[in-house]
Amino acid sequence: MGSRFVKFGVIALTLSHTGHSKLNMAPHDKELSEDLKKRIVALHKDGLGYKKIAKTLKLSCSTVGNTIQRFHRTSSTQNRRRHGRPKKLSARAQRHIQRLSLGNRCI
């Protein structure tokens, strides 16, 4: 199921397989850059609304709203630290193994 064109008078929209028009929005699994988040906050401080900011920066309205709400809550645009499994090897041990493997390519 590829894209297809639908004509409405003079305007032609490209529809994806989901039936929604394609907008130039950020993918769901990507984080916004720090610069972009700071621009969102600055535009909001200048008095622009969520919809105007979203249209200007080609982002979804909910992305803009979430960014501004997070800024009001934490006074920062930085993401929270993520937790993960601790490393098994120290940085020193990792460098040692790397040196051994580069020195002897048969390992």
Image (cartoon, rainbow, N blue to C red):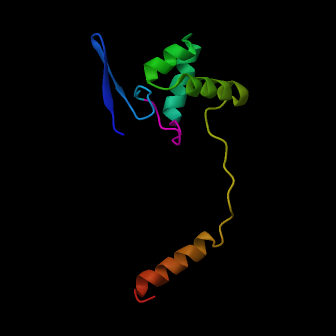
Left-right relation of 83 to 105: right
Q: Is residue 19 or residue 37 the one in the foreground?
A: 19
Q: Farthest residue in the front direction?
A: 1
Q: Is residue 95 above or below residue 34?
A: below
Residue 14 image offset from top left, x and y in percent: 34, 26
Left-right relation of 57 to 8: right
Left-right relation of 87 to 23: right
Q: Is residue 3 or residue 26 the one in the foreground?
A: 3
Question: Residue at coordinates 57% horizontally, 22% vertically from top-left?
Answer: 41
Question: Residue at coordinates 56% horizontally, 74% vertically from top-left?
Answer: 94
Residue 13 image offset from top left, x and y in percent: 34, 21
Question: Residue at coordinates 67% horizontally, 25% vertically from top-left?
Answer: 69
Question: Residue at coordinates 44% horizontally, 27% vertically from top-left?
Answer: 20
Residue 19 image offset from top left, x and y in percent: 43, 28
Q: Main secondary structure of the magenta part?
A: loop
Residue 96 image offset from top left, x and y in percent: 54, 79
Q: Within the image, what quadrant is residue 66 found in? A: top right
Q: Is residue 78 above or below residue 15?
A: below
**Magenta part of the protein: which range?**
25-33
Q: In which quadrant will I find the N terminus?
A: top left
